[in-house]
Image (spheres, rainbow, N blue to C red):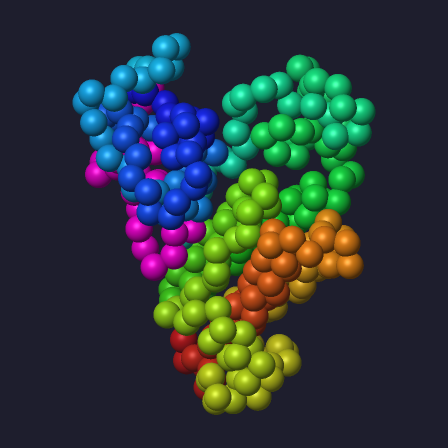
Amino acid sequence: MPIVTEAELREQLGVPRRGAVLRVPVGARLTPAADDLVRTWDLQLTEHAGVVPPAGVATGREPPPAGGGPGGGAARLRTDQAWDRPGRFPVALEGEIPTCLTCGSAVRDKPSHLTQLDAHHFAPKTDARIRLRGRLDTLQALTLAVGARARAEGHAETAGHLDTLAAYCRELLAAEYHGRAPGEIALAGLDEETIHHASHHPEEAVGLPHLVPDATHPETLHWLNLLRCQVREAEVLVLDAYPPDRDDTEVARGLSRAVNRLSSAVYVLELRLAAATRGGER
């Protein structure tokens, strides 16, 4: 089964154009970097039997899931938000040998104190971006764990929304790694601005004042509150990695806004659960 890389897609694409149509071999799968390029520019992939895979491309990989297309179905999946899809490992090991961000030398055998910053560089694990990435990874894991707790308590709707937020955590990781602004968050039919407004005006959103969790609330709500606290800590790490007084790029502004809105989204889930469980109801 042919594997299509980001470099091969960019060779066809030239200057990036949103919605451009690219040709790939029948049954092709995408590398993570290629998949990210497709989603970022909303590229349309068409399979053509006449497209020959580049020499040396590995074949014989396991087939994609049923109903999948290029990229094993990930690039073809279209929901209201392109990031709301199954997870993919974000690191792309392709192209030239990465170099050390500190000394500039090529890194052929990675030492234990370095990790891959992006497709071209390794950095110390104490780098501010790596610290942020570790926290985003933790957020995704915690979001899934809170979702599992919500299901166990019978809060199926909340659990489903947490699945969405876990996907958004993966979007934040991918965006940070590839150096692009994240997509806008959406949850429960609410867009980014509506989520933000609801988090500041809960009386309008759910008919409750601002929430102060206590022992009368269900366990899931306390886990949601812990998740919200962790997101707030991640906001600080974004500012450490992308100081607003020195970095006014689209990536820096986008990550700061996205993590802030993720905090709002978790709080909205807290509010909705508190409203739904008043009087002991689920």
In front here: 204 or 92?
A: 92
User: In which quadrant of the rendered view does residue 245 lie?
Assistant: bottom right
State whether residue 221 appears in this view. no
Residue at the image point whose x is 61% and y is 34% from the top: 118
In this orientation, does residue 74 appear?
Answer: yes
Q: Is residue 68 magenta?
A: yes
Query: Quarter-wise, where is residue 281 in the image?
Result: bottom left
Residue at point 48%, 62% (across, down): 185
Q: Is residue 198 left or right of residue 49?
A: right
Farthest left residue in view: 49
Tell me the quarter of the image containing the N terminus: top left
Name the residue at 28% across, 31% down: 23
**In percent of the image, x 57 and y 88: which residue is there?**
209
Quadrant in which the C terminus is drawn:
bottom left
Measured from the top left, where is residue 170 in percent x and y? 51, 47
Residue 97 image point, x, y percent: 62, 19
Highlighted range, magenta: 61-83
